[in-house]
Image (cartoon, rainbow, N blue to C red):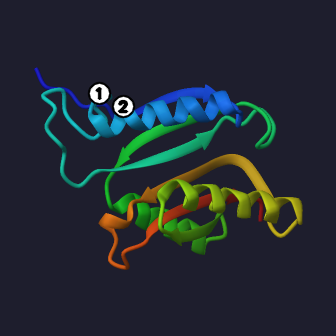
């Protein structure tokens, strides 16, 4: 019998140990050890992309939160873009040579904007999608953040 996971969730904090857990999960995800983008027969499932969902915040970015890695289809991003237009999320798009650096820079922008009161985060739910430069039309890695905001 073939099966497919649709998401995995861990609880963590933004600490070196938490970041190590995230790296371990993504390594297992890309290798197929965690069959999120693959079925149980280790066959890649076309049309899926991994998205990180941040939720169940204990307080803010300094407290514990749930990180869920989800396998989503293309229309997921269309829905998020509509929610940006409706003022429920603010979108950050950081491009560069490396996915990890893009993600770090994008999150730093969020934290700076929050600290400077440029945005008022809801700490309800946030999403992250990173795309390696090999898969983009402009040849740059991208990190897209959709940050839940209070309107």
Residue 47 is left or right of residue 52, and the answer is left
What residue is rendered at 57% in x and 31% in y?
Answer: 20
| Image location of residue 72, percent across then percent down | 36, 49
Residue 129 is left or right of residue 115, and the answer is left
Residue 113, located in which quarter of the rendered image? bottom right
Q: Quadrant of the C terminus?
A: bottom right
What residue is rendered at 31% in x and 31% in y?
Answer: 5
| Image location of residue 94, percent across then percent down | 57, 69
Q: Secondary structure at mark 1?
A: loop
Instruction: Name the residue at the top extreme.
Output: 1
121 and 103: which is toward the camera: 103
Q: Which mark is residue 33?
A: 1
User: Is the Cβ of the residue at disc 1 closer than 8 Å to that at disc 2?
Assistant: yes
Instruction: Name the residue at the bottom extreme.
Output: 138
| Dot 1 or dot 2, earlier in sequence | 2
Q: Which mark is residue 28?
A: 2
Judge the density around disc 1: few (<14), some (14-19), many (≥20) Cα neighbours within 10 Å: some
């Amino acid at each position: 019998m073939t099966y497919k996971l649709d998401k995995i969730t861990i609880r963590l904090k933004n600490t070196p140990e938490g970041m190590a857990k995230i790296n371990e999960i993504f390594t297992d995800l890309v290798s197929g050890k965690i069959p999120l983008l693959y079925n149980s027969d280790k066959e890649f499932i076309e049309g899926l992309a991994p998205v990180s969902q941040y939720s169940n915040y204990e307080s803010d970015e300094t407290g514990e939160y749930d990180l869920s890695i989800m396998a989503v289809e293309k229309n997921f991003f269309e829905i998020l873009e509509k929610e940006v237009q409706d003022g429920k999320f603010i979108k950050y798009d950081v491009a560069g040579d490396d996915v990890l650096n893009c993600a770090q820079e994008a999150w730093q922008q969020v934290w700076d904007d929050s600290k400077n009161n440029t945005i008022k985060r809801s700490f309800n739910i946030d999403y992250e999608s990173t795309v390696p430069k090999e898969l983009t039309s402009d040849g740059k890695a991208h990190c897209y953040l959709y940050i839940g905001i209070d309107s």
